[in-house]
Image: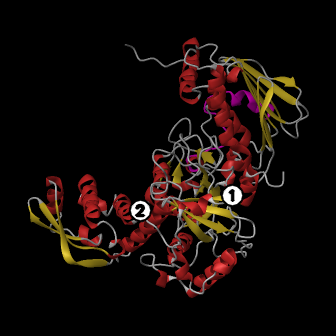
Amino acid sequence: MQIKLLPDQLISQIAAGEVVERPASALKELLENSVDAGSTQVQVALIQGGTKLLKVTDNGHGIAKDELELALTRHATSKIQSLDDLEQVGSLGFRGEALASIASISRTVLTSRQQAASHAWQISAEGTQGQPVSPAALDAGTIVEVHDLYFNTPARRKFLKTENTEFGHCEDAFTRIALSRAQIGFLLQHNGKAIMRLAASTPQQRITDVLGNEFAAQSVWLDEQSSGLRLWGMTASPTYQRHSRDTQYVFVNGRFVRDKLIAHAIKQAYQDVLHGDKHPAFVLFLELDPSLVDVNVHPAKTEVRFRESQAVHRFIFHSLHKALGKTSAEIQASQPVQAPFNPFTPGLAMPRQQVEMPLQNRSVFDGGYRADNVSNQGAAIAQQFYGQLYGDLKTTDISALGNQQQTHSPEDYLNPISLSEAVLIPEPAQEPQQYPLGFALGQLHGIYILAQNAQGMVVVDMHAAHERIMYERLKNALSEQAIATQPLLIPMSFYAEKVEVATLQSLQGSDTLQQLGFDMATLSPTTIAIRAVPTMLQDADVVSLARAVLRDLHEYGASRVLLERQNEVLGTMACHAAVRANRQLSTTEMNALLRDMEATERSGQCNHGRPTWFQVSLNDLDKMFMRGQ
């Protein structure tokens, strides 16, 4: 076949196929032009999901009369003039293709007026057939009207979805631009109805206005800078879990992007605090020198390429990892956030909203939960608390309180008591702010700890909480290569499966087990002996723990465990070391667990991402019992 030069109309329509995939793509390009024009107010009006009409009005700088025709010409732009401009582009648009591509597949009307102009001017195009520039009425700025999108490419129009679906995509495009430019006021209308109205505000307020108060209440603000990189925005607590990625926004120098490198760094930061197949929520802004990022990768400008990709990855990971540690620890808003509803109301699921508490600059316990580990100050405060709580039952030795056992016969609970026989419980003293989880009242079914703090009642899943504590300690010890080993006085042997023996034999000549704090040896083709275990796990079921570690080593490979899969192995070890359900804890042991939670980062979730505790306020309890009504 003979090689021929394509006509301009076909070239524009081919380009439109890349740039204008659907009405939302056209809206994105027009909104970017409005932002680049220095607008402070932008209005969007859609009819039938943008297929019948897509109209964008702004109060930006406007376009001169002599440049209106050029504005609808391919590869004509005011944003870059040279390669240097392209390599350091700071505007959202720069390719000079959007308006020409849109005009080639629609009936477009462009009206604009500069501030110094005596009146506005207008140009229209139907496909590639342009009309002469004519006078028009407009105060200032620019109006772009796109009628009958894909009217001359019916095959392309067939691929459009329903009106609601196309409007949903347009709303997403509108939301992304609105999030990236809080200083601009936006209005979105669909079929004559106002859908979203956003006044110019601060970034925090704009995020709250767009994503809602629930997201803002369960998010932490971060602003980290290092080596010319800055990451700021809001990232949600792991308890604010989503079934989809619909609340994930990343902006690079103000441009919304989808980047695998950034997505991987964020996923790693959330990996040991997110439950199952749930997804995190965040609005993050990455700022860096424009010359260090290439935005000219894809016609839609949603992909980027970093010159120093590993440095960017490390920076994002460490910034988010630090911020997520704050969500249950270092935020100075020491008042716990109350549950959004009464968790005891039938038919309601567990509250998603979690608490925030200040990180204690100490670790109450380095070992197990023993009475002799309690600090003098903590014991004195606890003694005062229980003394006021139980009145005449107060004892001088707080450890004795936890060890006291009261026995009751069934008749004790069946016989009514008079008010004169009842024990009157005085109001407890206000706990100091350094103990936001308060003090333990007791256990529920050997699974939960009930505690009282200044806000009301705290319910703790003791296994999940202890699992997170042990997990963080193991991570810190492994990073410092300081997992202490406890030799067993009498080595413990157990019957092993063939795969377990093979896994252990494959570790000969490797120090992987030693770094994890284990010493195991093969005694026979079916027997393994355990000679030493990590000191902090010495109270765990040694055989079950050894089997679990060998299983992880077999699954992930010894060479990858300490590099790529250490969190999974340490999570397994922490799970086996954590206190089990139905283990009765004394009051002192329960308080020790609460103090350790206050001293541990990310203690609001176990390493599987499940919540470890939540708050029930006095107001919630009063409403449940209709007090004051």
Residue type of the residue flagged with mark 2:
Arg
Q: Which residue is mark 2?
A: 580
In front: 164, or 6?
A: 164
Mark number, residue 338 = 1
> Which element is circle 2 on?
loop
In the rendered image of this protein, does residue 542 appear above or below residue 27?
below
Q: Position of residue 187 (x, y in %)?
A: 79, 36
> Which element is circle 1 on?
loop
Residue at image point 34% right, 71% down: 537
Residue type of the residue flagged with mark 1:
Gln
Residue at image point 61% right, 50% down: 352
How many other residues sit within 10 Å of disc 2, few (<14), some (14-19) or many (≥20)? some
Quadrant location of the N terminus in the rendered image: top left
Q: Which residue extends farthest right? A: 118
Residue 401 in the magenta stretch? The answer is no
Q: Mark 1 to mark 2: distance in Å?
A: 27 Å
Q: Earlier along the polypeptide chain: callout 1 or callout 2?
A: 1
Q: Position of residue 67 (x, y in %)?
A: 74, 32
Q: Quadrant of residue 146?
A: top right
Q: Position of residue 506 (x, y in %)?
A: 15, 60
Residue extent of the magenta highlight = 64-84
Mark number, residue 27 = none
In front: 57, or 250?
A: 250
In the rendered image of this protein, does residue 377 appear above or below residue 431?
below
In front: 393, or 177?
A: 393
Query: Position of 365 compared to 120: left or right?
Result: left
Q: Position of residue 408 (x, y in %)?
A: 54, 66
Task: Look at the image and tell me whether residue 565 can be seen.
Answer: yes
